[in-house]
Image (cartoon, helix red, strand yellow):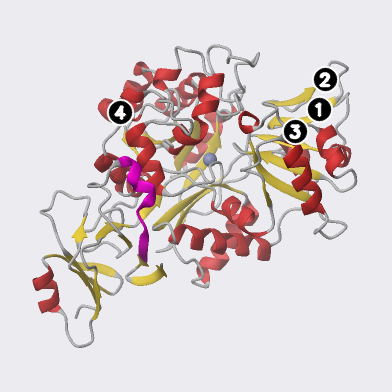
Amino acid sequence: MIDLVLYNGVVLTQTAAPPAQAVGVRDGRIAFVGRSADALNAATAATARIDLGGRTLIPGFNDAHAHVWKIGHLLTTMLDVRRVDSVEDLVNRVRRFSGRLPADAWLLGRGFNEASMRERRAPTRDDLDRAEPNRPVVLTRTCGHIYAVNGAALARAGIGPATKAPAGGVIDRDESGRPTGLLRETAMGLINQVMPPPTPADYEAMLVAALRHQLALGITSSADCGVSPQLLEVYRAVDARRGLPSRVNVMPLRRVDGVPKPVPLPELFASDMLRVDTVKFLADGGLSGATAALSVPYRHVRSNGVLRFPNGELRELCAESHQAGWRIAAHAIGDVAINQVLDVYEKLGPHRRGFAHRIEHFGLPDAAQLARAAKLRVIAAPQTIFIKTFGRNFRSYLPDSFLPRTYPIRAMLDAGVRIALSSDAPVVEDDNPLVGMMAAITRLDEEGELIAPRQAITANEALYGYTMGGAIASGDEANRGSIEAGKWADLAVLSANPLAASPEALPHLAVDMTLVAGRVVFER
Ligand SMILES: [Zn+2]
């Protein structure tokens, strides 16, 4: 007995099977893929029917690397400053937002990017003190690797001229040694130690808001790349109540900034909606803020970036995770960090569950590193959307020799490295996978400049990367990622065929409907 038939459409199965026009669903899984007439023949009076009217059916998108709770934080209680284009505007927004908060609350915001500011600089403590001198203000840079904080926040954390930065972190100072309010990488932990954490109810509101936001974009599987033990507990509790509206691959952190000891490995877990079998590490910083670890200095910044594990701890923690049966997802963007992670992976030996480890972002590999990654069966989780959003930062910060290999997706595929495309949201505001597909095809940034144009891929490769790619990267390709009998009926209905549209038209395609396990969970 078929529960639901979707017919009269263009079904992009992401398999080698012949083209199909219809899908039948039974008990939340795909039971049939083929011609409309055959699907309707199998239907009974009790079967629900959706006439696609020529529209396109795809496997639900998989955002293989996102920060679900942080997306939700911006959708609930956090000040969003991603569109701010001057320090003055930022100061005004902080002032206005502060007026709406309870007296004892911290003001948290996220999303500034100095490259988008008229002044071409990040806000400082003095700017933020003008906006709000009393309550602590903590603004996270768009990349998530740098804080700008006011004097009250520095005071709560006890950060003064004599404070030493922790290993793998930087406290920016002026010529007199006074902290400027900018804290990089592990130095953010000094603030985290004293900042009040979200409550379980706050976390749950964030998760649900973020997952609903993703469903409106056709995203049926996502990842929360880097969660604390407290947040993991909330995920487990919400999942136990069947409260997750879509599927999440939650990656616990072993190292939390501001927590002195490594976090112990939690329990391995997998339900239909929640997977907990991948641990997340951060080997370096971000490219857009010039904290990714490079072998040569950045332009305009006298720095080679930050290696967050300056000693052998990364190898120890990875070896322990690997032996305990976990998949490792290591953030590595600069060539120095990529080498560090590949060296670690090379020494791990075979995985007892056959898992392939991941490199998140994988922004600047050279040819030798690509060959090593392919040999190790590493799965890359890069973000083509960065090309569009951060192209200006790349052009400004990257040495000339690095620009042609920035997010080299073509070279990854040609080297035999499997890729899972993703947004890293809220690092970028626009996490629409169709926009990420456009950037993968055109390699154009927001100012119309080409970024490493030889690294372009096709629309079909991009769609595969955003569907099957993520399924493979989470180790669950048996259940999701393509439209095949036996897999979950996680589907999105698009207003037109993304493989027939021009790349520039992709962002204008509408997601008309999203289904998880055969249930319509979003409708435009
Ligand atoms: Zn990330």
Q: Position of residue 501 (x, y in %)?
A: 26, 47
Residue linked to disc 1: 180
Q: Is mark 3 within 8 Å of ligand 1?
A: no
Q: Does any portion of residue 375 appear in the rendered image?
A: no
Residue linked to disc 2: 174
Mark 4 or mark 2: whose residue is earlier in sequence: 2
Task: Say which residue appears at 60% left-offset and 45% top-offset.
Answer: 264
- Which amino acid, by three-letter code, is at mark 3? Pro
Numbered marks: total: 4
Residue linked to disc 4: 410
Q: Residues within 10 Å of mark 3 (few under 14, many from 20)?
A: many
The residue mark sitting in front, 1 or 3, is 3
Residue linked to disc 3: 123
- Element under label 4? helix
- Which amino acid, by three-letter code, is at mark 2? Asp
Q: Is mark 2 within 8 Å of ligand 1?
A: no
User: Disc 2 to disc 3, how far (Cα)?
Assistant: 14 Å
Proximity of marks 1 and 3: CB atoms separated by less than 8 Å: no
Q: Is residue 505 magenta?
A: yes
Q: Is residue 163 left or right of residue 242?
A: right
- In this view of the protein, which residue sits in the foreground, 82 or 255? 82
Q: Residues within 10 Å of mark 2 (few under 14, many from 20)?
A: few
- Which amino acid, by three-letter code, is at mark 4? Arg
Mark 3 or mark 4: whose residue is earlier in sequence: 3
Bounds of the magenta span? 503-514
Residue 362's place in the image compared with 459, above or below, is: above
Q: Is mark 4 within 8 Å of ligand 1?
A: no
Task: Say which residue appears at 43% left-offset and 24% top-offset.
Answer: 406
